[in-house]
Amino acid sequence: MATQEVSRQTKAQLSGLPADLQTALQQRQLPGLHGIRAISAGLVVLYHLGVPRVPGGYGVLAFFVLSGFLITWLLLQEEQAQGCISLRDFYARRTIRIFPAFFAYWGLAVALWWLSSRHGGKPVHWGQVWSAFTYTNNYYQSIVGDPGSALSHTWSLAVEEQFYLIWPLLFTRLRRHRVLGLGLGIAAVTVHRQQLYWVHGNVDWAYEAFDGRADHMLYGCLLATVLWQGRWRSLWHWVCTPWATALTLLALVASTQAGQSISGYRNVVGFTVEPILTMFFIVQGMASRQWPILRWLHARVMEPLGTWSYSTYLYQQLAVGAASRVPGGWGLPVGLLLTYAGAALSYRWIEKPFLRLKSRFAVSLQPQVRQPPSVKAAQPNA
């Protein structure tokens, strides 16, 4: 009964959205998102392995938007079912999901770096080591610079962790005005980033600092909120068509390629245009199971690749370093093999065992129903 009640309420909120999108949003595991995760991680891997014209930076941006969307969608579900959210349970779930795999990678990377330094390799930058450990490497590298190590990519993980700390607190305080608050937040960060770039000339801060990239996660939060409330229906009916999907993909390719060719484009234009296009692509990805243009996004291989995407992002940095030493043009296949093997092993032996603990802090999507006193009195042995 309770599950059906949640379903009816959700259907009422989503009514008026495109039928395929409605169907997707009512599923417990939103379709198409494993494929988007897999593609985003793959772009980063190929970029770091030196494949020309691959927009690795866009892979990170897509992860940011997707993280904002998924976290907000889960918070909205919990709020509807329970009337509020449990910050304790939220932070416990994030801790179980993120920390075990990260600190296992961190320990391995530091140990290998230290051993290499003892045999004539690059000396260990302990400032980066400890800033990565405390999820502050985005600000460390913005101020000190990137020494180029197996921990350099942890700046983006720091941005996401800072988002996870702050957003649930803001979420509970923006209940009545979330769309307005998110819109103002996106505008403020966009203006701030332009100021960092044009006035202060601080490109690294604009690229890696949380206050320079927070709008990309806020776009995802905005998408989840407007879909949950059934807003912008005419827009989603236009977006959820194969020809609009083709336009989205072409625009993303054009923008990411311009970012690699035109000086300043990425910071000035790309970082504003691409998260909006990514919002469209997320919606299209969820609604596209029957569309030939995006059916590949729902292929079986995307599920494991998407599931491993977090560990893929972690281990690609070590794999790239190893692949760079492989002679004879075998660096790319060796790098891909090491990356995905490391990701699969990390998920199987580190992530998966800890993920079983998440059930202790799982969100119940059944609404709490208070029984009237007369009903309680009739059940003295309950």
Image (cartoon, rainbow, N blue to C red):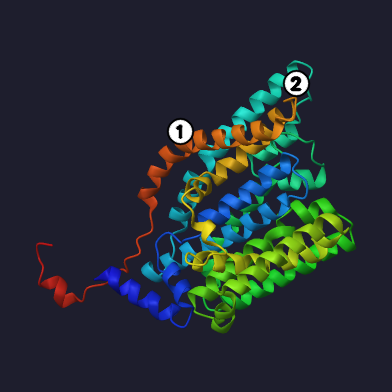
Residue 278 placement, left or right of 19: right
Q: Is residue 329 above or below residue 196?
A: above
User: In the image, residue 226 lies at what x, y percent?
Assistant: 54, 75
> From the image, which quarter does the N terminus lie in?
bottom left
- Report which quarter residue 2 is drawn in: bottom left
Q: For numbered disc 1, what is the local secondary structure? A: helix
Q: How crowded is mark 2: few (under 14 residues within 10 Å), some or many (20 or more)?
A: few
User: In the image, residue 289 lies at what x, y percent?
Assistant: 48, 64
Q: Which residue is drawn at 56% across and 68% down?
A: 284
> From the image, which quarter does the C terminus lie in?
bottom left
Tag count: 2
Q: Residues within 10 Å of mark 1 (few under 14, many from 20)?
A: few
Residue type at mark 2?
Ser
Q: For numbered disc 2, what is the local secondary structure? A: helix
Nearer the N terminus, badge 2 or badge 1? 2
- Report which quarter residue 77 is drawn in: bottom left
Q: In this view, does 32 lie above or below 232?
A: above
Residue 320 placement, left or right of 279: right
Q: Is residue 11 above or below residue 51?
A: below
Residue position marked by numbered label 2 in the rendering? 117
Residue position marked by numbered label 1 in the rendering? 349
Q: Residue at x 80, y 53 (%)?
A: 205
Residue type at mark 1?
Trp
Q: How far apart are marks 2 and 1 (CA)?
A: 29 Å
Residue 310 placement, left or right of 367: right
Q: Is residue 34 visible?
A: yes
Q: Which of 79 and 146 is in front in this view?
A: 146
In the rendered structure, find residue 372 and report the number of the disc placed on it.
none
Q: Is residue 136 visible?
A: no
Direction top: furthest residue: 119
> Of the residues tagged 2 and 1, which is closer to the observer?
1
